[in-house]
Image (cartoon, grey):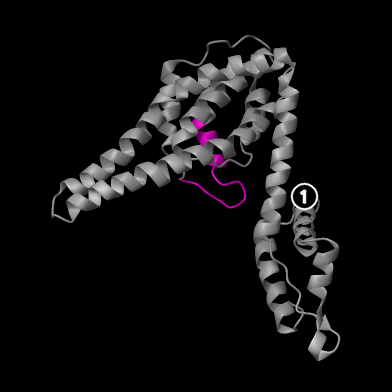
Amino acid sequence: MTSNASTKGVITKKDLRRLSWRTLQGATSVNYERFTHKPLVWALGPGLKKIWADDPKGYSEALQRHLAFFLCTPQIKSWMGGLMLALEEELKNNPSMDPSSINAIKTSLMGPLSGVFDSLFLNCIRIVACGVGISFAAQGSVLGPILYALIYNVPAFIMYFGTASIGYRMGTSAVTNLQESGLINKVLEAASIIGLIVIGGMIYSNVSVNLAITFGPEEALTSLNDILNGIFPGILSFGTFFLFYWLLKSKKVNTLWLVFGALIVTVLLVAVGVM
């Protein structure tokens, strides 16, 4: 039976600490379709169960909702988890809230936050830790690996265990303010536009389809690939992408079949001189 009973304040500090511990397992299950969605749901599970305790259907829908694509810097997963629990709590207390806004907000934050914290931890803190550690290790000191571990992991653990409550406190008030001001729809629209731009750029830069078909005199050969790109730059790449999207979305073709199918078709087309 569905219930709209208020769950305000149901998440405690103990629940957030449990969330933080579970986010340490954030890369134990990874696939190239949705990346770290399962560890995220495992981390959120106890909190979601507590929020939707009187609504089994709502709990099931919440689990399914967070099985969407998820990828971000490991050190901010705790902050993101606290935010997601706050949004789920707001959804439980506010039936007029659009459930899709939770994933939209999560998706819109993954890229910007990862851009900042990937640079901070991988290109800054890790480099400093390596420099200090190597300098001591080169002198034969056991402090080398110890200092490396401390310099890199202390800030990481501060993020893991110090940001879940910050994300949780920010979540409900942020959504409430966005709804009251009418900005929530603009945020969702902006996230959709940015997502489409990013996907378009990824298609053009990461999907490469080149035809080897040429015609005309030998001294002035014309490439069919150049003609098609002159009409619409990247048209073959976009066509291939939408073919795969159609097969995934409409025909429910398994991703493994698509990967091996693309490999086999490519080899055959290269063998006959089409690509």
Q: Quadrant of the C terminus?
A: bottom right
Residue 110: x percent and y percent?
Answer: 58, 37
Q: Residue at x 51, y 35 (%)?
A: 42
Q: Residue at x 73, y 56 (%)?
A: 253
Towards the viewer: 170 or 121: 121
- In the rendered image of this protein, does residue 30 appear above or below residue 275? above
**Residue 113 seen in the figure:** yes
Residue underneath mark 1: 249
Towards the viewer: 55 or 177: 177
**What is the magenta range?**
28-43
**Residue 52 seen in the figure:** no
Three-letter amino acid code at the position of disc 1: Lys
Q: Residue at x 86, y 86 (%)?
A: 216
Count up the numbered dots: 1
Residue 45: x percent and y percent?
Answer: 53, 29
Horizontal side of 39 relative to 193 (left or right) equals: left
Residue 55: x percent and y percent?
Answer: 65, 19
Label 1 secondary element: helix
- In the rendered image of this protein, does residue 209 appear above or below residue 137? below
- In the rendered image of this protein, does residue 198 appear above or below residue 54? below
Magenta-span inclusion, residue 36: yes
Q: Residue at x 66, y 19 (%)?
A: 91
Residue 8: x percent and y percent?
Answer: 57, 10
Residue 190: name its quadrant: top right
Q: Label 1: few (<14), some or many (≥20) within 10 Å?
A: few
Name the residue at the bottom extreme. 218
Residue 94: name its quadrant: top right
Towards the viewer: 46 or 235: 235
Name the residue at the front extreme. 219
Residue 223: name its quadrant: bottom right
Magenta-span inclusion, residue 54: no
Q: Quadrant of the N terminus?
A: top right
